[in-house]
Image (spheres, rainbow, N blue to C red):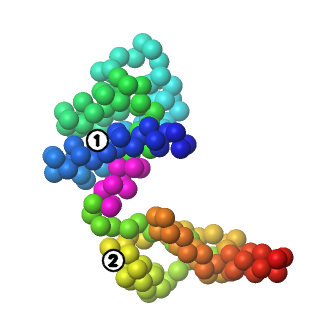
Amino acid sequence: MTQALTLARPYARAAFSLAREAGDSAGWSQALAFAARVAADPQAHALLGHPQLGEAEAVALLAPEGAGDTFKRFLALLVDNHRAALLPEIAGLYEELRADADRVVKARVTAAAELPAAELESIKAALARRFGREVEISTAVDESLLGGAVIDAGDVVIDGSLKGKLARLQTQLAQ
């Protein structure tokens, strides 16, 4: 996985640069997401690796309907360099670059039970103060946490779950 990210990073940066030049970062985001879903499909993945599949056919398979010429040339470059399989990683890195440029932090709140909207807004406001950026929150429920929540915001993980507290207490007692 680390090698795939290393290989994908320059392509993601190039895609982001092209999208910014065109003033269409949202369009590129959608097009990359589509191409990434296609490339991740097992049948399409096998087809993309077939030696008899031409560059034009591969681009036609990966490009969403109405994709611009620049995006198609980008896909052609990936196909030509045998990097089409990296599209899921490229799309993910692209989204990180876009969020950073838009000064947005994406946070995932995993709780033991569904959180009320007021509590989510409170978490969102606290994260916005901490990072000094706009915050987009997605939620998940994991009953194994027993109580509390785990907040994953990029490089920062805040574990306020009962399961995490018990694990930390057990570690302290073992020492």
**Residue at coordinates 53% horizontally, 73% vertically from top-left?**
151
Taking 40 as reference, is 117 above or below it?
A: below
Which SS type dominates the magenta stretch? helix
Q: Position of residue 94 (x, y in %)?
A: 35, 49
Residue on which the image places disc 1: 14
Residue on which the image places disc 2: 132
Q: Are marks 1 and 2 in contact (CB under 8 Å)?
A: no
**Residue toward you, 149 or 47:** 149
Residue extending furthest toward the left: 22
Q: Is residue 133 left or right of residue 116?
A: left
Q: Which residues are magenta?
A: 92-100
Q: Quadrant of residue 144?
A: bottom right
Q: Is residue 36 left or right of residue 28?
A: right
- Residue type at mark 2: give it: Gly
Residue extending furthest toward the front: 175
Q: Position of residue 24 (x, y in %)?
A: 19, 50
Image quadrant in which the N terminus is located: top right
**Crowding at label 1, few (<14), some or many (≥20) Cα neighbours within 10 Å?**
some
Residue 121 can be seen in this image: no
Asked if residue 112 is among those painted magenta in the image, a careful observer would answer no
**Residue toward you, 174 or 163:** 174
Compare marks 1 and 2 and give the one earlier in the sequence.
1
- Residue type at mark 1: give it: Ala
